[in-house]
Amino acid sequence: MLQRATATDQVVGFGLVAFSLVLFVYYTLWIIVLPFIDSDHGIHRYFLPREYAVIIPMVAGLLLLLFIGVFIMVVMWKSRKPVKKSE
């Protein structure tokens, strides 16, 4: 039987989608649109320096790989079976 998502699940899902959309629009404006706007324009105050456009995703990717590796290590550690000693 198919269960429908609860109201809490829908609110959390909507929040995650909205956050992702805002992040995508901000990053797209920062990387694609901002280089074509004069550097003395006031909109540059709302964005980090351009070198962070590479550093932040790189650090986020490394942290993601670290967490995936730790998760796999913990799952493998917990699921190992005790070794029987042969006599």
Image (cartoon, grey):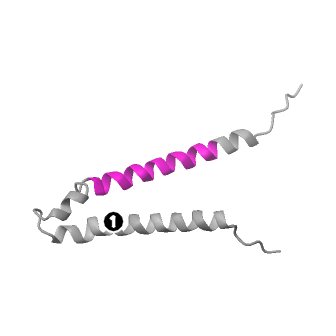
Which residue occupies 46% across, 63% down?
A: 19
How many numbered callouts? 1
Instruction: Find numbered disc 1 in the image and state the secondary structure of the residue it sits on.
Output: helix
Which residue occupies 37% across, 53% down?
A: 58
Q: Which residues are magenta?
A: 52-73
Q: Residue 65: within the magenta?
A: yes
> Considering only vertical position in the picture, is 11 above or below 67?
below
Q: Position of residue 65 (x, y in %)?
A: 50, 50
Residue for badge 1: 26
Q: Position of residue 35 (x, y in %)?
A: 18, 67
55 or 72: which is nearer to us?
55
- What amino acid is at disc 1? Tyr
Which residue occupies 62% across, 68% down?
A: 10
Q: Position of residue 3 (x, y in %)?
A: 77, 71
Q: Which residue occupies the extreme bottom position in the image? A: 2
Quadrant housing the C terminus: top right
